[in-house]
Amino acid sequence: MQKLIAFTLLLCCAQFVHAAAPRDAAPNAELPHPLSASWSWSLPGKQCTESLQYLPGGTSTGRSGAQQIQSRYEVSALPSLLGFYRLAETVTESNNQPDCAGDVLEVSDEPVVRFIQFSPGRNQLIVCRTEALKECYGPLKRISP
């Protein structure tokens, strides 16, 4: 009798898992990371705009004020328990001009680590120094998918 109950439970669980699996998803199909897009932000009180483009292959381009850079980046696939994605960017090319905040990013082998958090609709994001809502800027708005 116990074997029959165990078998029935196993059969029900197997059908539940099969029903929960997406039927139209291609095997090994990966959705693009929500960061993979073009983003824009204007510094409050200044006539300066920052535009960033993150490509799915792990490269990015950026323009902020007079600054133009190209980078390699790695971003965590899932957010932390605090809701932040870890983003590490390594500048590979720079024109050594100041950005909207007056900072100059130079080519380096050392990545700059930041933490990003998306709005619920994933059409905006903020960029923070740590996994906390302090020392952040944004929101950057998605300008293309």
Image (cartoon, rainbow, N blue to C red):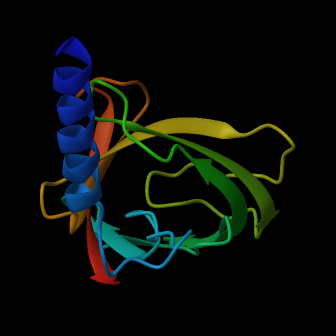
- The residue that appears at 20% across and 60% down in the rendered structure is 19
Q: Nearer the viewer, residue 16 or 121?
A: 16
Residue 92 versus residue 101 in the image, above or below? below
Q: From the viewer's perspective, is 19 left or right of 41?
A: left
- The residue that appears at 52% across and 52% down in the rendered structure is 102
Q: From the viewer's perspective, is 125 left or right of 92?
A: left
Q: Quadrant of residue 67?
A: bottom right
Visible residue check, residue 118: no
Q: Nearer the viewer, residue 10 or 111?
A: 10
Q: Position of residue 16 (x, y in %)?
A: 19, 49
Name the quarter where the C terminus is drawn: bottom left
Q: Quadrant of residue 37?
A: bottom left
Q: Quadrant of residue 82?
A: top left
Q: From the viewer's perspective, is 33 left or right of 105?
A: left
- The residue that appears at 27% across and 55% down in the rendered structure is 125
Name the quarter where the N terminus is drawn: top left
Residue 21 versus residue 3 in the image, above or below? below
Q: Nearer the viewer, residue 113 or 29?
A: 29
